[in-house]
Every structure is written in C-alpha cells, then in structure tokens.
Amino acid sequence: MNIDKLDLEPLQKAIRSLKTSIDAYTLDKQNEFIRDSFIKRFEYSYELSHKIVKRYLSIVSPHPNSINQMTFQELIRQAYTKGILENSWDMWKLYKEARNNSSHSYNEDKAITIANDIEIFYSEAIYLLKKLQDYNKNI
C-alpha cells in the first residue's frame, strides 16, 4: 500500500453507522435509546473526521510537522482551503460545540438540540469522504 494513501475504511463505517441512526431517529424521534445512539455515532464520526483531516493535511503539507502545531480552527480552515471540507470554521465550530455538549453532561433538552443538528454534519462527512476517496484515486 502506498504510504500516502489514506485508510478510509473506519470513516466509511462510521458514516454508514451514522446514516443508519439518522434513519432510525427520523422514524422515532421520541425514542431516547435511538437518540442517544444517534448522538454517540455522531461523536465518533466527528472524531474520525477530525483525525483524517489532520492526517490528510500532514500528507499534503510541505511542512508536515507544522500541522501538529495548528489549532483546531486553523486545521479546519486549511482543510477548507484545500477543498476537502464543504464548510469552513463557521459550521465546524457548531459541530465542535455539539460534540463538546454531547460528552460533558447529559441534558435531555441539549440532547434533542444536538440530535437536530447532526444531519447537517452528516452531509459534511459525506463530502469529506468523497474528497478523500478522490485524493486516494489520484495518487
């Protein structure tokens, strides 16, 4: 395997899992178990997206060590500039807040709000995956 290729399988699985939970949640928004599963799947899809963005930038950067010094905001802006993200910091800030809110305390009202925002992240994750698949095909 070429060292510059990205292993996208974990992200693909996470996105499929997120889609399954979106579908289930859409059918039964009152079910707490489904909502909690939906949020958990968002959390690990978000984390994998962040890690793969960082990995991609490390590969394509002329100064890979500089990527480790970047803030999350800088990473997202750089990835957006490179064309692998559909949205820049304005939306990713919302995803990050949803992620932070989902893991720091459980509050049903917050959980409902987070669940309502996750579908927007799903389209971002699909966009990222497609761009990275294109990258892999072209190297």
Image (tube, helix red, strand yellow):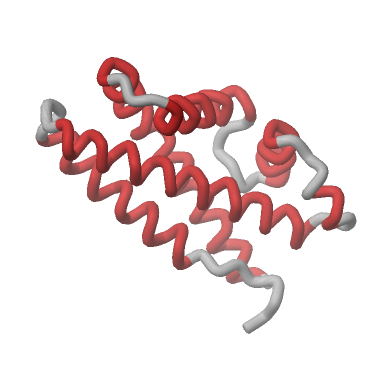
Q: Residue at x 67, y 80 (%)?
A: 2
Above or below, 50 relative to 65: above
Above or below, 130 relative to 89: below
Above or below, 32 relative to 107: below
| Residue at the far right in the pictured view | 63
| Number of numbered discs | 0
Q: Position of residue 59 (x, y in %)?
A: 75, 62
Kindly indicate the quadrant of the structure image that contains residue 103: top left
Q: Residue at x 71, y 40 (%)?
A: 75
Above or below, 116 relative to 38: above
* 62 left or right of 105 in image: right
Name the one closer to the observer, 8 or 97.
97
Q: Position of residue 69 (x, y in %)?
A: 82, 43
Kindly indicate the quadrant of the structure image that contains residue 109: top left
Q: Position of residue 72 (x, y in %)?
A: 68, 36
- Classify the position of the N terminus by image quarter: bottom right
Name the one closer to the observer, 5 or 103.
103
- Classify the position of the C terminus by image quarter: bottom right
Name the one closer to the observer, 64 or 130.
64
* 95 left or right of 72 in image: left
Q: Position of residue 25 (x, y in %)?
A: 18, 36
Kindly indicate the quadrant of the structure image that contains residue 102: top left
